[in-house]
Image: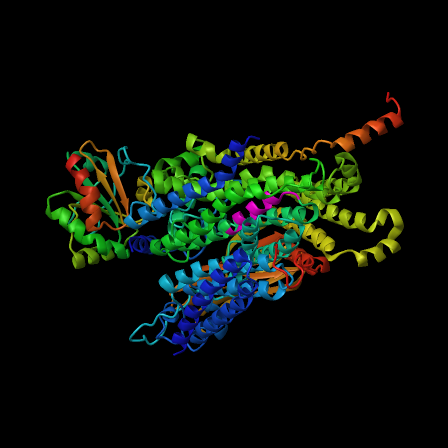
Amino acid sequence: MIAELGHYALALALLLAFAQTALPLLGAQSRDARLMGAGAPLALGQFLALAASFACLMHLYVINDTSVLNVVQNSHSAKPLLYKITGTWGNHEGSLLLWVLILALCGAAVSLFGRNLPSALRARVLGVLGLISVGFLLFTLKTSNPFERVWPPPPDGQGLNPILQDIGLAMHPPLLYVGYVGYAVTFAFAIAALIEGRVDAAWGRWVRPWSLAAWAFLTAGIALGSWWAYYELGWGGYWFWDPVENASLLPWLIGTALLHSAIVVEKREALKTWTILLAIIAFGMSLLGTFLVRSGVLNSVHSFANDPERGLFILALLMFYLLGAFILFAWRAQAMVPTGIFAPVSREGAIVLNNLLVCSITAVVFVGTLWPMFADALMGLKVSVGPPFFNAASFPLVVPLLLAMAIGPLMPWKRAALWPVVQRLWWVAVLALAGFVLALLASGERVLPAIGFAFAAWVIGAALADLAERTGLFRVGLARAWARAGGLPRAAWGAAIAHAGVGVLAAGLAGMGLAHEKLAALAPGQSMSLAGHEWRLEEVRDVVGPNYTARRATISVIRDGQVVHVMQPSRRWFPVARQNTTEVSIRTNMMRDLYAVIGEEQDGKAIIRIHYNPLAPWIWLGAAIMALGGGLSLADRRVRVSAPNRVPKGAVPA
Amino acid sequence: MRVLLILLALLASPQALAVSSPADMLPDATAEARARALGREIRCMVCQNQSIEDSEVSLARDLRLIVRERIVAGDTDAQVKSFLHARYGDFVLLRPPFSWANAALWATPLVALLAGMGLILLARRRAAPPALPPLTEAEARRLALLDIQDGPRA
Amino acid sequence: MSGLSRRLLLLAPVGAAAAGGIGFYAALDRQRSGEYNPRNVPSAMIGRPPPDFTLPEVADSGIAPFGAADLRAVGGPVIVNFWASWCVPCIIEHPQLMRLAREGIPVFGIAYKDKPEDSLRFLRQHGNPFRRLSRDEPGRVAIDWGVYGVPETYLVDRQGIIRWRFAGPITPEILAQDLRPLLARA
């Protein structure tokens, strides 16, 4: 019964999405205020229908209804309740339902928060969002219906992959999807602008919060996935340039370029055509990621479903939306009148440089991910592209980006001189140099990490310099600057904090370059030493969990004769899925991670591997700071104070 | 279905449960470090997206042992790589070797940068300020008057 | 910039997306037909003679072991099959190997990382297609052949050159479409 309700709600949502597409778009073309106004309630209705549908699916998981195929394939009665709930989206069909739910949520948000948008623009945005919903709802209903029944119902489900039974990984998809789907909104704004034939500062002011929100969530989602890999997979790695990881990085990179060029559209009315193109490409990358993960064309540990039939449907959706948008772009972009002019050396110029470098990095990741696939599928050539390629090829692009990141925010708009700005950063350069030398000495002549630290110091110092300049710290003294700081717009804080976050991330990466590890077979009572600590294995014992059994080691970490930490890594065995997982033990003090893994046991000895990872937490801390900066910028009053409605009430929009 | 079967075949191999065993490591620390660095550039042919240093499967362990044996036997890094390359082809190396097919790959950063710069230059040349409309009769007379008032310019 | 070049530039994304779409479609199509398998790796040994090796017999099997010299001595095409008793797809492909053996085509087997008693049990249960049978418990010889999993099957022609390698279970389609034509020519 609940499954049928969920199914009906899904079909209802499709009908509402059809209406949400047709009515507002027609209304905007014919300037009919009533039709245009229909968009908002329809979007809200679609959201409610999908929320109901998703709630039904979640309910089915919680009660472990084995007459529903999706539950049988992905769940089990012995699974802890939390993972029954999060397992709702831990599979292809459920995650797709989550995707369309978030899309509907964005549509509802545009309806609610966009009341001050000009009605034609809002109608078109909602119409395009409706069109995207229609495509994905059709896909869900036709090929990936989570409410399909199975008869006779088996006694229990087949369980969930034990690797997915983890809170970090459980929260990773929702955060990512808000990011991916958020770019559908900027896409809709871009299409609306193309149809309308107008991009102005007001458009920029509405697009910017959406691109910020999508970017912040995508940052958090990617960081969570990377952190999960670090603590779950057990060899201290956190990024593998796996095709599916890259598929999430591509929209993030374009999104970074987008959020910077949207600033120029808003403040200077320039880069309009380019920003529209970026908005289209950002969503295109989201769609491409969806396609790559779910179609099975790519060789990856992550892939959801190797199903070429579904792949064809998604490819058709991808082509429809992307080609349609590009054709519209080619046809209508001429209508955009470029107004703002700026000198090459200026803040706009710095943003253009940012876009150039970021898009080049995107090209590297894009080619590195897709070229092997195309070469293999179309030419039978097996090309090998792995982390060494990605790291080496993006390094020469990241370096100028980090350098320019410091200088850009300090430049005035429209026209600037480079040298005076660089001169003002003299103390930051000194800081960076000091960082380099200190790191070199402390790490024992390791050059590459030292360079990383130098860049980290440069970027963080420059963010501080930005704040110092805005508050006039060096001109009016500390007290007055402090007062000014309180009045600084949140967007200024957000930008500085986000940039500083990049520096923290860079420091974390550099620190990991200095990591040590050690491997030994220990009997209880034996110990080994690493990084000035003694690690003693106390015991290994059996442990029973709700749906697993485990062998858990207890390790005392001793420094200067005192036990400073007790670590308990374990290996779990899940009988239903017949799989092992490693549970790493990590002790962090935010400056370094101690990381212990237990391996096989032989002859009374257990194989223990320990790592000492300096500054590892800063990797995810840096990403969190970046997301925080993005969120802070979102909270800026100016961002949410909407431009006055260009249309006087009651009149027909021009 | 076939893909699934192949996956099963590859995963059905007896797995070494430890990532590696201390007994596998070389006694000489520099040689062991060299073996690890080398191992990170060799693809695990079973997991395919991990290096042999990261993978737990038995083939990865076998390959790790081979790398260490060859290092002890005195091979250079290049020789160890070509030993594995002779048996498994290009795909086993995570850093694509330089060949014509891969040259395009390695040129991507430069090509992307140049293409981007080209686009920017083209766009800037197009964004010339709009031409001013010619002066009307009245405006031309006013300009002439102002010119006379200002006097001759140097 | 002239109107034409601007128009071309604006149409470039359309062209790129369309080309990508066609490429992805072709890749999906080939995946469905089995022509493209992202996990499949082409053998580096094609066109080369097998590595030099000798391997011991599987105890109590009654089947003679073989080495590289024995492959050359056959004087005709030989199928070399790497398998193991713990390998599930090997059971699936076994009927095809039996069929080849019945037709008189020499099928030589190498038991990979398998205990002799387990290998024997497998053959007693499913039948024995192997004219010659060796065991490679350490798996080193397999590595010399470029094997990365089981089952893997190689075709060595009459000149002693490896002509074909298939990773995965041999299905009737693979037998008919890929192997038969090569056997005729080898």
Report whether residue A444 is seen: no
In the shown orientation, is residue A312 left or right of residue A112?
left
Report whether residue A71 is seen: yes
**Residue drawn 73% across and 48% down?**
A463
Quarter of image, res A370: top left
In depth, the one of C120 and C175 nearer the eye is C175
Residue B57 rendering spot, x and y as whole percentages: 40, 52
Find the residue positioned furthest to the left.
Answer: C103
Residue A493 rendering spot, x and y as whole percentages: 73, 55
Find the residue positioned furthest to the top.
Answer: B154
In depth, the one of C68 and A23 nearer the eye is A23
Residue B87 rendering spot, x and y as whole percentages: 35, 38
**Residue drawn 75% across and 56% down?**
A489
In the shown orientation, is residue C176 left or right of residue A54?
left
In depth, the one of C127 and A50 nearer the eye is A50
Considering only vertical position in the picture, is A322 above or below B129?
below
In depth, the one of B126 and B144 nearer the eye is B144
Q: Is residue C60 located in the magenta-colored stretch of the structure?
A: no
Quarter holding the C terminus of chain A is bottom right
Q: Which residues are magenta?
A: A270-283
Residue A229 rendering spot, x and y as whole percentages: 52, 56
Find the residue positioned furthest to the front.
Answer: B137
Q: Is residue A277 located in the magenta-colored stretch of the structure?
A: yes
Quarter of image, res A641: bottom right
Quarter holding the N terminus of chain A is bottom left
